[in-house]
Amino acid sequence: MEPNPMSAALISSLSNSFRQIPLSAIPPMLDCILASTPLTPLSLFSSLLDDLPNHIEGANRDGKLDSHYRTNIASLVGALCHLLTKAILEATLVPFFLRSIGISAGIIQNEELDGTRWYRSSVLKVSNDLIENLDTNKDYTHSLSGSFPLPLSCHVLSIILDAGLRNSLAAPATDSLLQNGCCYAVKFTADLLWNLCNVTERLLLQSLENRSCTIGFLLPVIFKAFVSHSSFKISVHGQAHILSRNHFFMRMWTCCRKLFSLGSLERRDAYSILSLYLSYFSCTETSESTDMTDGSEEFDVRSEKDLWNEIKRGLVDEEGLVRKQSLHILKTVLCMSSGSQCHSGISEKKSQGKHSVPHGVTKREMWAYNEAKSLGVGKLSNTVDSGLNSRQQWEAFLLLFEMLEEYGTHLIEAAWNHQITLLLQFSVSRDSFVSTISRGVHQNQSEIWDEVFSWLSILWKRGFCHDNPQVRCMIMQSFLGIEWSKYGSCVKSVPKSFILGPLMEALNDPVHHNDFGVKGVYSSKTIEGAAQFLHQFSSYLYARERIIFLNSLASLAKRKSFSRAGLMGLAECIAASAFGVSEFNDNKAKSCEDGLVDNLQQEYASENFPHDDGTELLDVFRYVLDSSKQHFNPSYRFRVCKKVVEAAASSVPASDVPLEILLHFISTLPREVTDYGGSLRVRVQDWLLQNHYTVHWGGIQMKLLASVNGFPERFTSHHHLVQNFDDEDLDAWELEVRRWARVLFLIIKEEHQLVPLVTFIQNNGTNICKQNNHSEWIPVKFLILILGLIQEIQVMQSKTSKRGVKIQTKSEIDLLETEKQSSDTEVSDIYTMFTDPLLFILEELVSFANLSCSIFSASSNMEDKVLPSSVRGRLGGPSQRRLSNSLTTAALQAKISSKAVACIYAWCAQLRSGILLNSAFTFVWKFFFNTIASPTCHSETEAEVCIAAYEALAPALKAFVSAFSPQTLDLFRENCKSLLPAIEGKPWLDSLVLSFLQNINDLLAVGFMARTRRAVLLNWKWICLESLLSIPYYAFESKLQLEDDSFFFSDAAVRHIFTDIVESLENAGEGSVLPMLRSIRLTLELFASGRLSSIVSRCNGVDSQMIWRLVRSSWILHASCNKRRVAHIAALLSSVLHPSLFSDVDMHDTDNEPGPLKWFVEKLLEEGTKSPRTIRLAALHLTGLWLSNPRTIKYYIKELKLLTLYGSVAFDEDFEAELTGNHDARTEVTLLAKTPESELTEALINTELYARVSVANLFYKLADLTNRVGSSSGKKDCQAALESGKLFLRELLDSVVNDKDLAKELYKKYSAIHRRKIRAWQMICVLSQFVDDDIVGEVTHCLHIALYRNNLPSVRQYLETFSINIYLKSPSLVAEQLVPILRDYDMRPQALSSYVFIAANVVLHASKEIQLRHLDELLPPILPLLTSHHHSLRGFTQVLLHQVLCKFVPPMDPRSSEFIPLEKRCFEDLKLYLAKNSDCMRLRASMEGYLDAYNPKTSITPAGIFVNRVEEIGFECVPTSLMEQVLNFLNDVREDLRCLMAKDTVTIKNESLNIGEGPGSMEKLSTACEEKLFTELPKDAQLDFQKKITFSKHEKPEIDSSSLLGKGEAYKQLLEMEKEDDLLNQLLKSRSLAMERIRGNQQDIILVASLLDRIPNLAGLARTCEVFKALGLAVADAKIVHDKQFQLISVTAEKWVPIIEVPVNSVKQFLEKKKREGFSILGLEQTANSVPLDQYIYPKKTVLVLGREKEGIPVDIIHILDACIEIPQLGVVRSLNVHVSGAIALWEYTRQQRSLWLTTQQNT
């Protein structure tokens, strides 16, 4: 190709120019040419390369290569090289790597789909040949570019850009050239920067790898480019653009915001971007100092509010690395990075003299002040008035945050409270630290407060989430301890998100509630503090804000799972927040300073309570109540309910919410709290009636009452057609009515308020048959309404007339007594008021019931039909009926109508009689007869209708039987004669019951019913049978008199019924268990020959075979039951262990074999050891039976012993909940045998004590029975009681003496053996009343054996009490047994102490007739024990003897002249000494009147053992014994003595440390160490030098201690040994010289480990000090080196390293002494100013202080240190073992000293 003439001319001109300029000027000249001409580097390179041969030929033509040619060729070659670089970079290399990035990141593929070419848009000049080549060989270039990893491509381009930047900065007149467009280097750099900025923005929003490459390679060089230039001018396809720093920063910030919203990894990358940005552009740079080419304002990311929000989010992130990055960003933005940060407390100004302590500062606050000062936080105390500026506040904030992240617990504890208080105080009341970041964004003070508390909440949240529970507790107490009242309305600025999030989560943390639930108190200091804070917080919220906040707070129960304490805390906080409503007006005045009062008043006055808000609030409150039901303790639930009710009453007007919502909320409350006697009844009534808000909400009571009275009309009327309904509809209606009736009688205060309801009943009940077909009125609903009213009034009546045993809390009993009188009158009036209208409509209801029940008589013509899918879909529902919709509706209507008639009849029969009631009775009885006379079923539909008939019959029959009366008996007789003529002359109920059983059994036998439907029918069978069997019982209760030879049942019928029940008992379903067991109980009552014999035919009773079948079936039923229901267990006990059976001896023992009842009791109690409620209920029932039948006790000694020694869980919350909320459970428990002591039962039934408490009460009552005199049968019972008591006593005594566990002497306190011993001896004390002369010898023999054995004082006190009562009951045994024992001075001191206590109390509590005799017998052997060497025996005797002397030795009259015997004067002086001696007085004072209150007679009663300590049940109800009190006192005295001795020792040590202040003191220490080593040398020397004496064979027998010195040969050997002393001396000298050399090589570092107390750490440090030749190791007690564990770990290191004893209290003086000797005092501790170990240069003479294992170095020692060093840590766990830390620090010291020594050696 011919060269271009212009190009040729240019080439010629260039060649001439190259000759005239130096070689270094050629590259700039070429850059100017390329910038000013359209030539590319490649074309110019080709032209010059073509011209190069011409120059070479010219040189060869002349034949020589002179300097002119050499210069010309060199210049041309230099130009070629420069152009080659340009051509490769611009035309090939840069586009290639840009394309490689595009392929790796997927940018090119995505843009090719859009028809664009990413690399074509590059501003770099890419040759068309290259583009065509890239397009032609696309696959090849794609594979080649893809083979380069993205990090390599980014790295290459970053290097190219960096080189370009350096060239552009090196070019002269860069700015002018850029403006003229003639600097190629700057243009190339700008073009490449443009491309890389575009690439960077795309890569940052892609994968993690792409972001890492961008952040690691591209962003640093891009930011570097913008440091030197604020903008670059770029030409893109001929169009001029400006690439400005401002615009790029905004694009990067946009990317960061997108990354923040994606996830944790993306957030970390965004922080990395910001960190790079802030590292290149310091916080001191201002926009004024930058010349912006585009004229726009400099972008400053610090002015972006989102940045600060993201920093806040990062500081509380769960990931530690994110928190660190966020903290770094915050420090950088605030210009407080670790390199430049200077805490306000690290002031170079040293205060002169001592600081004055602020007035009123406590010791702990002063400690916190000193600790904070050492950490570098502010000048405090004296400069508080001057305040903290914003920078100092930020420093305090950063320090507190770093404390939580890095520092030890003791440092947080020391400085937190003080610093957070100051930070809060000055940020709120003075110049706030957020003002430095607000930059004019916040317009008013309220917004500034919001920002301040948003930052403070970060600290609190991090504290609540700290790993250390101790720190979490401290932060919580610090937050709750803030006096928020000082800050006024600022408290409302605490972020709601913080309260609803971290604060409530922390409140759910169990670590804050250690005292929760203790002694029945379901609260804690933390809960109280949180409630107080929220009360303060909500009181400043606006009315609308408060409702929204309450809703959000209560809604937490839906979103989170709360523990018991957490849910209680939530309820307390809800109540406290709601209480803020009532105090809102009081706090409005406090907002005057903000100028907001007018606005608040205007809002509050104009804002009505929103309807939807009240609905939502009650809904979330109801959810809180539902959540409390999962916790079984009723007291706990009642407290939660109380708080929720208080919140509802304070925040929601009852009349402003829909009635349905209000009814639903009230129904969620437990009935026990709103019924008569309920703890919340009055509070709920006040809320519903709004008595305390009548001024604000006028007419509320009338509005709510009108709504409630209008409910019946709305309920029974429907505006849409309702043809059919099912069981679910029925259940929903019944629930709705129960809710309404409950609220109705809560708001009714006067009778006239019920008149509209009575009128409604009369108007609608009289024409119910006419309205049956009315589509807008459903009669069933009307009947459900009637039944709901009756049920509610009956509940009210039962609450006001409680009978029997009911376990209640004291508060419930008190409240019940206060309301009982008024409630009785009120309920009786209501009862009477509804009787007449119900009686008035009864006839109409009977007609309607007859009409409805006709469905059952028509069932014989029914055939099976194909059920619709809607019915088949409900077959698995609650009813599982297999009927069509129409038949289901008819059956349900019949069921409700029959039940309504029966219930109204039972209701009215109590107050009225007459013909109106006769029709109802006749209907029920005919319905019963028709049901049991129904023919055999031939289809499934007929069977289902029969089931529905029995379902309707069961409740009707139950209501009918409960109202049995004389009139009922007459009606019953007449109906029986008319319906069953064959019954004449037979027992009245035989035919009825047998026909009933036959019919229902036939129905069960048909094959049409599914298994589930047969189970339903069985359930109704047993319910109906229970009602039929109850008729004789109700007749007897009503005192009915039958005609002669008239009975209800025959013996055969009763046996048949009994057999039928027992045979079905094993397979009973859960719903049938209770009615079956009750039927058994009623059947056994009929068998008994007692009270019902007058109305039951003569029967032969039961035989053992029948009872055997019963107990075996019952046991199978009980064992197969998965859930131990209280009602089922109680019914099982009262049925199987029936009192009528228990009196029969054959039921307990038959031919020395267990009888049926005995077998059942054994099985039951054996299983009961695994079921606490079973054994407690069994103990309750059995002890009542045993008390009624003492003759049976002898068969149950083993069982009595089991109950005595039994112990299990202390509290069964489910048990308590069932007793409280389950009517059947309460009823069945009251039917158990009468307990010997109802008070103890009520108090202890739900504790582990109750089993043995019931046994103790049993024998206490039996002991009273033995003293009674009455009939012959009574004498037999007394004798049986006495014999059983003796038998049980001997059994227990034999166990405590011979049993393997109970006789053990060595056992741990609070162990299982300890507990069993206490239980056994507690019972033995109760049985002491049964000791008679015939067994007293055997008893005392066992007693003395037990007393002589070792036992803990808690057990021994019961032995002593039992012994005292034995000797008080048998005075003759005192001289016979006690006196010789007291004179046995070789007895164990423990046993002798017990006998002293026994003797003293025998003297003190004996009867007056023999008291002096006992004194004369027992005082002489006791007196010598005052001189006992055993301290506890001596002190024990002094206390007891003082009591005796004070009672029996009257004070002498000093004025009396009569002669006083010597012994009396001795006793008087002894009494005076014991009374006046200070130690004896202190000892008696520690007894706290124990001896005065002790009464051995009351101490053996159940009340004395258990009841007196019910309120504070401790370990097995055991009080602190006198011996324990004496021992505790003596131990305290000894401890005080040890402290005094230790203090004296410390004083002596400190004085010794202060001696020798001169330069020779170190030599003295060295000498002392040398002497110590020298004293140990002989022992060590013997290890190396040993002289053996070897005897000849014939001399060996003569070598002994007596003949050795008498032998001449032995003397010679001794002389030889003496001659060898010289050898020993030489050895010692050599060892001494060796020790001198060792000391000469020791390093000048002393480790102070006096604060450590763990032996392994101390031993390891000793070994480390020996390895590195430390100068010494300071420990608190040098005797520790003799510890076996120490020696095992140290491996003799203590023999080679000096051990210096420095007690803990002397550490400070020791360090000050060493500092005066020239040592530098260092501490290994993390503080705010600690220096990393690898950055610290150790002084040669160093003392290194190690802190405690957990707490670190105390603050008073930190102040002495010259510096603190810390070991840099990279892992998650932020601590090292103290031994490991000391070893690392010691090695670093050794490494530095060795490096220094090597450097010195090399220099010399």
Image: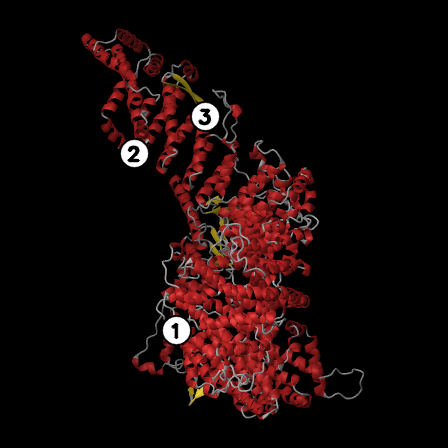
- Position in image of residue 1680 (x %, y %): 48, 63
Residue for badge 1:
1002
Q: Nearer the viewer, mark 2 or mark 1?
A: 1
Name the residue at 64% across, 42% down.
Answer: 607
**Quarter occupied by the N terminus:** top left
Q: Nearer the viewer, mark 2 or mark 3?
A: 3
State the residue in front, 1737 or 747.
747
How far separated are the C-alphas under marks 2 and 1? 88 Å
Q: Earlier in the sequence, mark 2 or mark 3?
A: 2
Q: Is residue 755 left or right of residue 1353?
A: right
Q: How is the image coloured?
A: secondary structure
Say how many tags the image has: 3
- Position in image of residue 680 (x %, y %): 62, 60
State the residue in front, 1234 or 985.
985
- Position in image of residue 1566 (x %, y %): 49, 56
* Amino acid at circle 2: Pro
Name the residue at 68% across, 54% down.
Answer: 691
Residue for badge 2:
149
* Residue 73, placed above or below residue 615: above
Instruction: Using the rendered image of the protein, determine whether residue 339 is visible from the camera's viewpoint.
Output: no
* Secondary structure category for the residue under label 3: helix
Instruction: Using the rendered image of the protein, determine whether residue 1536 is visible from the camera's viewpoint.
Output: yes
Residue for badge 3:
247
Q: Earlier in the sequence, mark 1 or mark 3?
A: 3
How far separated are the C-alphas under marks 1 and 3? 94 Å
* Residue 101, placed above or below residue 935: above
